[in-house]
Structure formats: structure tokens, C-alpha cells
């Protein structure tokens, strides 16, 4: 029995055959596209799969990012070492992060210590925002809230135990440790 060279329908492509690769437009977030050229020329394989640029580029540009997509429920976890959390579904967790973005259909229940929080959806629980809390028109924040600065768009809701001055809960660096001195 002879085995044909096209076993399992594999085809060999001649190396002399010219390939025409059209780069895909880059996405700029939430489905918007940009016509600016890609920083790297995609390989024929990555262009065919819709991949533009390097796979490690997003991680180095914005740090570590966790996206909980629509209709996803993430319950009973502790989220650590995450620079940016994007919530489009439901998250019930405890977290300490730099940035939290809750989309209009997203909801977060639990405890969070954040540098910057942008709320389009719902937050319920203990929220400490060390720098800036932004509540958009569709946003609703309830619970025990501590913040450094707050911006509330018309229509946004903020209810519960609310206090200014979350800066004291920021992680002190070795250069910023408090010094106790007594007057004589």
C-alpha cells in the first residue's frame, strides 16, 4: 500500500509562491479601530488568525490586566497582583489593585482597595479609593466608601458610610514612614 504525499489532506505550499499579507486594523478598546500602522509587521500566520503585533505588548504597556467579560460570574476569590480589573460581568471578591473599571452592565460585590476606580455599573461593599473615584451617570456605589478625590457625573449614585481621606490607607513606602517626635 502506497501512501500519497497528500496524506490527511496536507498540502505543501511552495516556498517560491508570493504571499500577500494585509495587516488588520488595530483595536483601541471596546471594539473601536484605528487605522494607524501596527508597530510590528505581522507574520502570515498571525495575520491569518487576526493577531496584530506582539503577544506580550499589551501586558508590558498596561501591566497585568484581568477582564471579567459579560455574563461571567467570578465568586469567592481574592484578586492580587492585578494592575487593572475590568468588570463586565459579576465579581464577588476581595481585591487590592491599582485600577478598577466597572462597565455599565458590570457589578462588583465585596471589598476593594484601589488607586483609581471608574464606575459605570454597580459596586456594593467596602471600597477604599486611595486617589480618585469616578462615578458615571449609570454608576451606583453603595456600602462603606473611603476616597481621596471623588467625581460624580449627573445621575450617578453614592450611598452608605462615606468618608473623605482614603490617602491615609495608602501603602507607605520606606521613605514615607511616619516619624514620632516629642516637644521638650
Image (cartoon, helix red, strand yellow):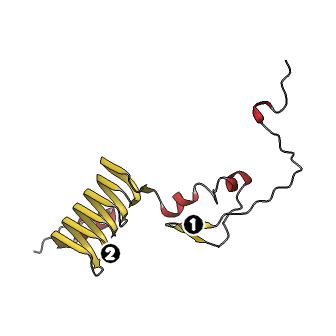
Mark 1 → mark 2, Cα distance in angstroms: 24 Å
Q: Which residue is mark 2?
A: 136
In the rendered image, is residue 179 in sight?
no
Looking at the image, which is closer to me, 8 or 154?
8
Q: Position of residue 65 (x, y in %)?
A: 45, 57
Return the mark for residue 27: 1
Looking at the image, which is closer to me, 70 or 131?
70
Return the mark for residue 170: none
Q: Residue at x 20, y 66 (%)?
A: 142
Q: Position of residue 140 (x, y in %)?
A: 25, 69
Q: Secondary structure at mark 1?
A: strand
Q: Is 182 left, or right, of 59 in this rendering?
A: left
Sequence-wise, the earlier of marks 1 and 2 is 1
- Crowding around mark 2 (Cα neighbors within 10 Å: few <14, some 14 to 19, many 20+) is some
Q: Position of residue 146 (x, y in %)?
A: 21, 68
Of the 4 image quadrants, the one containing the C terminus is bottom left
Q: Is 134 left, or right, of 126 in this rendering?
A: right
Name, please, the residue furthest toward the right. Answer: 16
Amino acid at each position: 500500500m502506497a501512501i500519497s504525499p497528500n496524506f490527511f489532506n496536507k498540502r505543501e505550499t511552495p516556498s517560491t509562491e508570493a504571499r500577500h499579507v494585509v495587516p488588520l486594523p488595530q483595536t483601541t478598546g471596546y471594539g473601536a479601530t484605528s487605522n494607524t500602522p501596527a508597530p510590528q509587521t505581522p507574520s502570515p500566520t498571525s495575520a491569518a488568525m487576526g493577531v496584530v503585533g506582539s503577544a506580550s505588548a499589551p501586558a508590558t504597556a498596561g501591566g497585568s490586566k484581568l477582564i471579567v467579560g459579560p455574563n461571567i460570574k467570578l465568586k469567592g476569590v481574592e484578586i492580587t497582583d492585578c494592575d487593572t480589573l475590568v468588570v463586565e460581568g459579576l465579581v464577588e471578591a476581595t481585591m487590592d489593585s491599582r485600577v478598577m473599571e466597572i462597565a455599565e452592565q458590570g457589578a462588583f460585590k465585596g471589598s476593594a482597595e484601589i488607586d483609581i476606580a471608574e464606575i459605570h455599573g454597580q459596586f456594593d461593599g467596602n471600597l477604599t479609593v486611595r486617589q480618585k473615584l469616578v462615578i458615571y451617570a449609570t454608576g451606583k456605589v453603595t456600602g462603606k466608601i473611603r476616597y481621596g478625590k471623588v467625581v460624580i457625573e449627573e445621575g450617578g449614585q453614592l450611598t452608605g458610610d462615606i468618608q473623605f481621606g482614603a490617602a491615609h490607607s495608602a501603602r507607605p513606602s520606606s521613605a514615607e514612614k511616619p516619624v514620632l517626635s516629642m516637644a521638650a
